[in-house]
Amino acid sequence: SRVYRKPTFPTSVQTNIVLRSSQQSLDELQGWSPLSPEGGYALKKKILNEGTGECIPLGSDVKVEYVGTLAGEDHWTVDDVECWLKNLQGLDQLAQSFRDNGVDGKILLDSTIFTEDFVSQTLGVSNRIQCKKLVMAAKRLSKQQLDFPAGMEFDSSAARGRSFEFRLGAGKAIKAYEIAISTMRLGERAKVVARADF
């Protein structure tokens, strides 16, 4: 992907924007810089080619050439699962129990572990309807991985035949773009990984 200020810099910052879950194993995080406002890795950047000069200032008009790909939920951290849970109507109050029991993507998507018994006995959910709702939601998420596998391209400026243009800081782009591009320097090429809420 390429990002540049118009009209002065026709090809100044390159980035591969990849929307996916955050992964927090130490090996996987080597070389990554956290960009999330809370300091975690829900939004992170890895510089592929160093740039020069100053970061692109807010208010600059930028043009982004990008490729967006998906990653599997099996790499979700407990934080990622909590984010997913908060989007399920009426179940966000269970977030602490998920956190306390270390429910990550591997547990959530393993139908031999994430059962109604696990939800009721381990997570302490006494309402049978909520138990069923959670297990069904996890099964839908697992099926979604088959329909939309990791690495699948979901958006690309090249496929559209045009770059995405916006004014940095004006709220016209997704939060991941706004934050990540504002940290880039002219000529920089980077991979950016963002959780869905970014």
Image: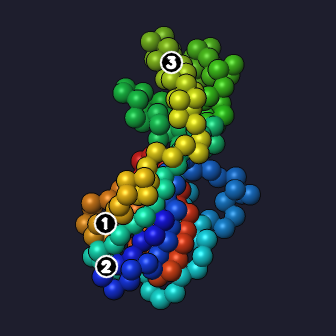
Disc 2 to disc 3: CB gap under 8 Å: no
Q: Residue at x 70, y 52 (%)?
A: 25
Disc 1 to disc 2: CB gap under 8 Å: yes
Q: Which amino acid type is shown beneath numbered disc 2? A: Lys
Question: In the rendering, which numbered label is found on residue 17?
Answer: none
First-in-chain label (3 vs 1): 3
Q: Residue at x 48, y 10 (%)?
A: 128
For disc 3, the marked residue is 136
Q: Which amino acid type is shown beneath numbered disc 3? A: Met
Q: Position of residue 111 (x, y in %)?
A: 65, 20
Tell me the SS state at disc 1.
strand
Tell me the SS state at disc 2.
loop
Q: Is residue 80 visible?
A: yes
Quote the CA–CA distance across marks 1 and 2: 9 Å
First-in-chain label (2 vs 3): 2
Q: Tell me the crowding category of disc 1: few under 14, some 14 to 19, or many 20 or more residues within 10 angstroms, Cα based.
A: some
For disc 1, the marked residue is 165
For disc 2, the marked residue is 6
Q: Residue at x 47, y 89 (%)?
A: 53
Quote the CA–CA distance across marks 3 and 1: 40 Å
In the rendered picture of this protein, how many numbered marks are placed on residues? Answer: 3
Q: Is residue 77 above or below residue 165?
A: above
Please tell me which residue lies in front, 25 or 182: 182
Q: Position of residue 40 (x, y in %)?
A: 54, 58
Q: Position of residue 33 (x, y in %)?
A: 58, 67
Residue 168 is left or right of residue 94, and the answer is left
